[in-house]
Image (cartoon, grey):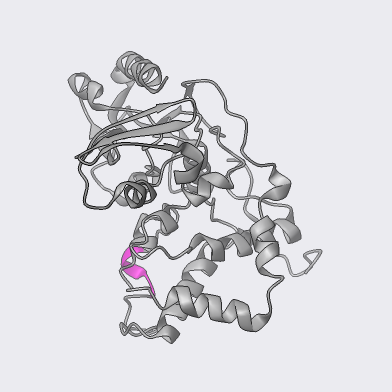
Amino acid sequence: MWNEITEKLHEVLRNVMPQVDVVLGWERGFNPLRIKPVVVRSEKDISRLVWNPFCVQNLTGYLVKNPAVIAGEGKKVAVCVKGCDSRSLVALIQEHFLDRDRLLIIGVPCQGTIDWRLVMKKIGNTTTVFNAHIEDGILRIEHSGGLEQMSIESVLLRRCLRCAYPNPVIYDVLIGETVTPRIDKSELYRNVAQFEQKSLEERRNFWIDVLSRCVRCYACRNACPLCICQDWCIAERRDPKWVTQRPTIKDIFIFHSIHALHLAGRCTECGECERVCPVGIPVMFIKEKLNEINLRLFSYEAGLDPQAVPPLLTFNPHEAGI
């Protein structure tokens, strides 16, 4: 199935190549579990592109953070997007960081992406992976220690287990059949509601415990397609000086709080912040709470309608419900 979609992707790209300067997609990395982003500029390299559940990266951040991903006059950038990625794209178009007319969006319905770290934990972190094959919901891994089988559901990224938008919400070409969402929209913030059943002390201790692992590497910030302050980020500015560079729990709290607040009403829950965290902090959980508030107050979910104006990008002193 994945090979068929990959072949269809190649066919589509060969047809549209005269319209585009750059194609942003995924290619195999150093082993079958490690897919990486790739920029393709000529038809002969289209065969490098792949699509499968290991294509975890949200590529839309490259459109605003990587100056190499730009099309010449009269040309477009072709970008491959999953459902969650497409919501980031919509948010970037809403905020005028991207021109919709300069994009050729190739949507791929997604059945969930696999956390390679969970796979390696099951088969042993020192093993060498030779091959990975998926069939009927089972992932089979051939590695230096033998053959291992596991259910796909047991190794999906957390963002995929709570995904209500597996199908791209914006695209020019859709490749593959649409997918039934894993959860209903009404269940989006079930985990937030369960967490809030805990006492204030329990919640405080949870965050002290997980955030104390933070090494201030800023991978969460750098991977976020909507975290676009870059050189102006408060984490590195000295004037005004909001946080120190010391990895104290106080500074860590301030950094993650401000990071989340900058994304309030904008976060599309693509989960890149959490996926790239080297110490496994559930960073997206903070943004989920903010999005739950945003949905409750404004009936708004980020990244669904390119024509909509996000409520926190407007101001009305007579706003109902506040």
Residue 320 visible, this orientation:
yes
Q: Is residue 188 above or below residue 221?
A: above
| Residue 310 x %, y % | 62, 53
| Residue 246 x %, y % | 31, 85
Furthest-front residue in this view = 146
Residue 163 included in the magenta stretch of the image: no
Q: Is residue 115 above or below residue 293?
A: above
| Residue 5 x %, y % | 40, 20
Residue 203 falls in which quadrant of the image? bottom right
Query: Which residues fall within the magenta stretch?
Result: 230-234
What type of secondary structure mainly makes up the magenta span? Answer: helix
Task: Say which residue appears at 53% left-offset and 52% top-offset.
Answer: 269
Q: The C terminus is located in which quarter?
A: bottom right
Task: Say which residue appears at 38% left-offset and 74% top-offset.
Answer: 213
Task: Say which residue appears at 34% left-offset and 16% top-offset.
Answer: 7
| In-image side of 130 versus 51 (left or right) | left
| In-image side of 136 versus 22 (left or right) | right
Q: The N terminus is located in which quarter?
A: top left
Q: Is residue 303 above or below residue 15?
A: below
* Foreground pick, 55 / 123: 123
Residue 156 visible, this orientation:
no
